[in-house]
Structure formats: C-alpha cells, structure tokens
Image (tube, rainbow, N blue to C red):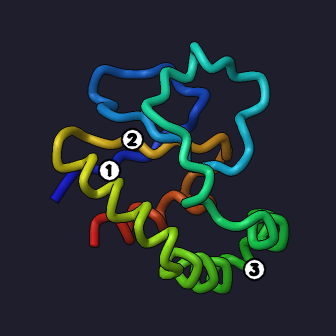
Amino acid sequence: MGEFRMRRAYDAPESADGARVLVDRLWPRGLSKDDAELTEWDKEIAPSDELRRWYGHDPAKKDEFVRRYRAELDEPERAERVRRLRELAEKQPVTLLTATKEIEASHLPVLRRRLQG
C-alpha cells in the first residue's frame, strides 16, 4: 500500500512529497504553476461544485458532507481516478494538495482514507 500525505498547495514543496497532486476543482488563488511544482492536477476527484458549495466547511454539515463525498467517490469515473492514484503511490509517496486552510475540515481526509483502502 502506498503512502498518501496531505498538505496545503501553498506550502513549499519538499523532497519527501513524491508525486504532488492537486485535488481541488479550482486553482489556488495567487499560486503560480511553477511554484506549485505539481505532478498533476486532478479536478475530477475533488467534490462536485454543488457539494463543495453546499458544505462550505460548515462543521454542522461535516458528517453529511463525508457521506455525500464518499458516494461521489463510488461513481465509476472517480473510482477509476482513485485506482490510478493508488497505482501512482505504489511507485512513490503521493502528496494530496488543497488550497483549503483547514485540511482536516476539507475533503482530503476522506479521500486519503479511500485511497488507503
């Protein structure tokens, strides 16, 4: 099983990051593509725009957000993306990146749990 790390896209890249994968639908404001040093940008594995807007990082909605995002990850296209990221992690660590300030309140912990299987 591969290693999956979680970091903010604004954090300076580290050698231990391995593959750096941005998993947000929107590009992080004020971050240049050069500074990001991404391996890839996977918009489609991120929560849908509708779910993202509904959640708005409201702690009262967290449990329902997790349930809905897990359901989105079960959709065939996203399930394929999960499989692909697992394959990438077999070769090197994968760092999941988001622009969100509070990573634990974001979709990253849900995605990482799914990736870890």
Q: Nearer the viewer, mark 3 or mark 2?
A: 2
The percent position of residue 34, horizontal first and vertical second, equals: 58, 14
Three-letter code for the amino acid on which mark 3 is drawn: Ala
Q: Earlier in the sequence, mark 1 or mark 3?
A: 1
Give the residue at x 51% y 70%: 77
78 and 23: which one is in front?
A: 78
Q: Residue furthest top?
A: 34
50 and 80: which one is in front?
A: 80
Secondary structure found at label 2:
strand
Left/right placement of residue 42 relative to residue 54 reads left
Disc 1 to disc 2, C-alpha distance? 6 Å
Q: Quadrant of the N terminus?
A: bottom left
**Figure quadrant of residue 26:** top right
Whether residues under marks 3 and 2 lie with C-beta atoms below 8 angstroms apart, the answer is no
Three-letter code for the amino acid on which mark 2 is drawn: Thr
Q: Which residue is mark 3?
A: 60
Three-letter code for the amino acid on which mark 1 is drawn: Phe
Left/right placement of residue 95 relative to residue 54 reads left
Disc 1 to disc 3, C-alpha distance? 27 Å
Give the residue at x 69% y 22%: 31
Q: Which mark is residue 4?
A: 1
**Figure quadrant of residue 17:** top left
Whether residues under marks 1 and 2 lie with C-beta atoms below 8 angstroms apart, the answer is yes
Give the residue at x 38% y 71%: 114
Q: Nearer the viewer, mark 1 or mark 3?
A: 1
The percent position of residue 116, horizontal first and vertical second, equals: 28, 66
Q: Which residue is mark 2?
A: 95
108 and 41: which one is in front?
A: 41
